[in-house]
Structure formats: C-alpha cells, structure tokens
C-alpha cells in the first residue's frame, strides 16, 4: 500500500474523528501533490461527520463555509507564541443544481465518500487517503497521474456546466503540472467556452494569474485555441500574439512581470485588460510599465540606462531585462527582437551590469537627489509653478547625462543660464 506522510495536525484530526466513529480522509490537491512528490500548500480533510458534529469534537473551530459543510479546525498554538495550524474539514456532500454555472443552489450531506468524490472536478483531484484505508481512487486518478493527463470526473460537459471556471482550472493544472488535457475534456472546453461569461472576473483573473506564474505560461495559448479568450474580458482577444516562453524557476514569479510579458508592447491594452479583470492598481501600473518597456531600446551607454532607471525605477528596470532575456532565449527571431538571440542576450547582460554600476555609484536618478532645491530656485527668482518644474526637469536631464554635474554651484549657474541671467 502506497503511503503518504501526513502532517501531525492532519493525523490528529483524522484520529479524533475516527475515534468518535466517523470516517475522515485527506482529500484533493494534497493527495495529488504528495503522490507527485510535491509539497502540498494546503491539507484538506473530508469526513462523514456533519458540521455540528465537527464543531462538537474540536475546541477551536471557525465557520468558514458552514453552509457548504466546511469548518476550519485550529490545531496547536497558544503557549510560547506558537501559531495555530488551520485545516479545513468538509462534510461528505452532494451538490444540488448549478443554476448560475458557478455555485450549487444547495448541498446535501451524505454518508458516502464515493458520492463526495464523484462531485469533484478532475480525477487527479478526486482521490482520498488515510493510513487505515490507503489511497481511495474511484476514478483512475492514479493512472491519469502516471499518464500526465487532466481528465474530468465523469462527464466533462456536466462538470463544466456545474462550474464553468473548471475549464480554466484544466488549463491552469496543465501548465502547473506539465500535463496534457484529455481529448474528451479538451473538446468539452471548446464546446462550452461561452459558459465562462457567467464567471466573475475576479475568479478568472485568479486562475489566469496562477497559470502565468507557472513554469509553463506558454499554455496561455490554449485560452485562445479553445475559444475561451472572448469570455475572459472584452479586449482579451486583441492580444495579437499570446506567445510566451517556457520559463524556468529562476525568473521572477511576479504577477506584474508575467502579465506585462503577455501584453508586451501594448501598454494601453495591458491596462485596459487588467482593469477589466479587476486587478489591483499597483499591478496594473507595473504591468503596464513592463509592457511599455518592451518598446524601449536595450541601453548600451550609461546615460541611456540612467534615463530608464530614472523613469521606471530599479525594480521595473531589472524585471524588464529579465523578461527580455527570456524572450531572446526562446524567441530569437521575434519581430521586436531583430538581433540574434545570442547577441541580444549579450546586450542585456551588459545593460544589467550598467544598471548595477549606476546604483553602486549612487548616481542621481531623481529630482529629490539633485543638489539644488526649492530654496535655491526661490533665491534665484523662480517660485513654485510650471517654470520651477521645467527648470528642475532640465537640470535632472543634464545630470542623467553626466552625474558629475550634480554639484550645487554648477546647477545654480545652469539655472541662471537657463533663465538668461548669467553674467
């Protein structure tokens, strides 16, 4: 019997439930990931105990989704400042009718584990485990894990009509696990793509972001190939080339960078799509900047690098270079990158070294770092206003060209010259 190493908290919960006469198993993604040799992010438990029975057996519980049978059980913590561990425990259930394509109208609790597992999305997520019974696999999930295949439990069309987001989840799991999607499941996605229009933009955004943050964001092309793109957001189909490189774990897993890479060269479109997906303002702005930076020339001289660092900041500058390096490696003949991949990578490495040297030297990159301030300008007869801002920008431009110019005497002299006051 194949054995899974259960965390102490999971063992304690299952043991307590079994000693009270109930069934209990670790279930879903934690079983899948354990069998794949991955470390599960969360451990979920399913049990024949009803919510009120769960609450009676454990001292500390939280009603996180009690209407759907889910209670969070807190284990440990208390003395010594140790933080309690939280585990979701859900009663065996059968979902009622899905009228909105998102949530069941009702749930019915059941004493049957098989009924509970049959409502789940994919076979690889429909396995349960405890130390007494071993792996409970009623839908050949183990075989699909070995084959590297995403297959719906039962009829794929029924699963996707219940919750249309499952179509995007199939694509996301395909990207995260490097699995193919079973032909029948993929065909059901194509047939029912329109159903995604009933799913909230927040849920769509969450799935697509997880896909982009995987090692295989190139799977985003499936969103277009399956016909899902028009239902992601109004302007999503305008992405002319959704090509993304296969990325290794050494590239930053930042949402703004991956979205910016997908939408490279299209700053306004990037911001429009991310607003439609209700992305947070900071990510919209940073992804838009990355998309815009793709149109910039890779700097070969320090003044060019200083101007880009001044305009976009350190984080975006180096994230942009990471993106360009990945694109040069995988798409050496991309329209936006006419240099050979190897030559372009060399330029990018030199640009990164330039940026690092500029920061190490502490070169002035902002108005606040200029060696003149508002008092100097006021003394020279320039009150705050349009002229004040224009003069400071002109001074910064000169200093970005040559940081040695960032001296108070020189800059005051330049202010006089700019105003025609030099004697």
Image (tube, helix red, strand yellow):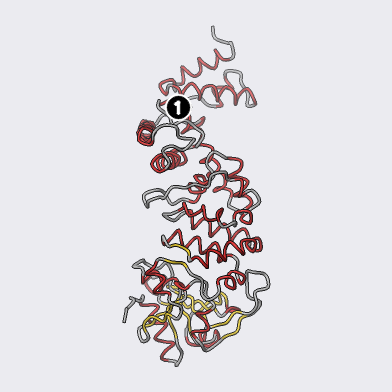
Q: Nearer the viewer, residue 368 or 176?
A: 176
Q: Position of residue 348 (x, y in %)?
A: 38, 35
Q: Position of residue 365 (x, y in %)?
A: 46, 31
Above or below 265: residue 216: below
| Residue identified by numbered label 1 | 304
Q: Is residue 249 left or right of residue 72?
A: left
Residue at left offset 65%, top offset 77%: 97
The secondary structure type at the circle numbered 1 is helix
Query: Split into 4 quadrants, where in the image is the C terminus?
Result: top right
Q: Position of residue 398 (x, y in %)?
A: 48, 21
**How many labels were placed on the picture?**
1
Residue at left offset 58%, top offset 10%: 421
Q: Position of residue 182 (x, y in %)?
A: 48, 66
Q: Nearer the viewer, residue 402 or 132?
A: 132
Q: Is residue 353 left or right of residue 94?
A: left
Above or below 28: residue 391: above
Within 10 Å of disc 1 (Cα), the crowding (few <14, some 14-19, many 20+) is: some
Q: Nearer the viewer, residue 33 or 187?
A: 187
Q: Residue furthest bottom?
A: 21
Q: Is residue 83 left or right of residue 162?
A: left
Q: Quadrant of residue 165?
A: bottom right
Above or below 134: residue 396: above
Residue at left offset 44%, top offset 62%: 180
Q: Residue furthest right?
A: 99
Above or below 99: residue 190: above
Query: Split into 4 quadrants, where in the image is the N terminus?
Result: bottom left
């Amino acid at each position: 019997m194949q054995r899974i190493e259960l965390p102490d908290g999971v063992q304690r919960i299952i043991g307590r439930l079994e000693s009270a006469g109930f069934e209990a198993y670790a279930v879903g993604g934690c079983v899948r990931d354990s069998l794949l040799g991955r470390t599960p992010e969360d451990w979920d438990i399913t049990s024949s105990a009803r919510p009120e029975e769960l609450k009676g057996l454990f001292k500390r519980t939280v009603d996180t989704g009690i209407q759907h049978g889910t209670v969070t059980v807190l284990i440990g913590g208390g003395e010594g400042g140790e933080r309690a561990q939280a585990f979701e425990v859900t009663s065996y259930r059968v979902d009622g009718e899905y009228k909105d394509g998102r949530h069941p109208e009702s749930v019915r609790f059941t004493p049957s584990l098989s009924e509970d597992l049959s409502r789940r999305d994919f076979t690889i997520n429909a396995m349960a485990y405890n130390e007494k019974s071993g792996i409970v696999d009623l839908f050949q999930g183990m075989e699909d894990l070995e084959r590297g295949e995403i297959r719906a439990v039962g009829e794929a069309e029924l699963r996707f009509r219940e919750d249309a987001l499952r179509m995007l989840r199939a694509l996301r799991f395909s990207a995260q696990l490097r699995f193919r999607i079973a032909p029948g499941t993929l065909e059901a996605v194509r047939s029912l793509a329109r159903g995604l229009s009933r799913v909230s933009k927040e849920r769509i955004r969450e799935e697509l972001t997880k896909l982009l943050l995987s090692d295989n964001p190139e799977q985003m092309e499936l969103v277009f190939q399956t016909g899902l793109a028009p239902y992601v957001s109004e302007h999503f189909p305008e992405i002319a080339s959704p090509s993304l490189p296969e990325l290794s774990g050494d590239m930053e897993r930042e949402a703004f960078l991956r979205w910016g890479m997908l939408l490279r060269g299209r700053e306004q479109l990037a911001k429009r799509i991310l607003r439609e997906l209700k992305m947070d303002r900071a990510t919209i702005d940073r992804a838009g900047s990355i998309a815009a930076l793709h149109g910039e020339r890779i700097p070969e001289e320090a003044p060019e690098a200083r101007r880009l660092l001044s305009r976009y900041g350190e984080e975006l500058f180096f994230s942009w270079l990471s993106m360009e390096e990945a694109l040069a490696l995988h798409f050496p003949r991309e329209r936006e990158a006419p240099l050979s991949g190897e030559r372009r990578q060399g330029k990018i490495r030199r640009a990164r070294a330039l940026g690092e040297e500029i920061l190490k030297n502490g070169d002035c990159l902002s108005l606040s770092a200029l060696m003149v301030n508002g008092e100097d300008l006021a003394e020279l007869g320039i009150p705050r206003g349009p002229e004040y801002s224009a003069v400071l920008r002109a001074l910064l431009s000169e200093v970005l060209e040559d940081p040695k110019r960032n001296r108070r005497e020189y800059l005051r002299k330049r202010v006089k010259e700019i105003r025609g006051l030099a004697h």
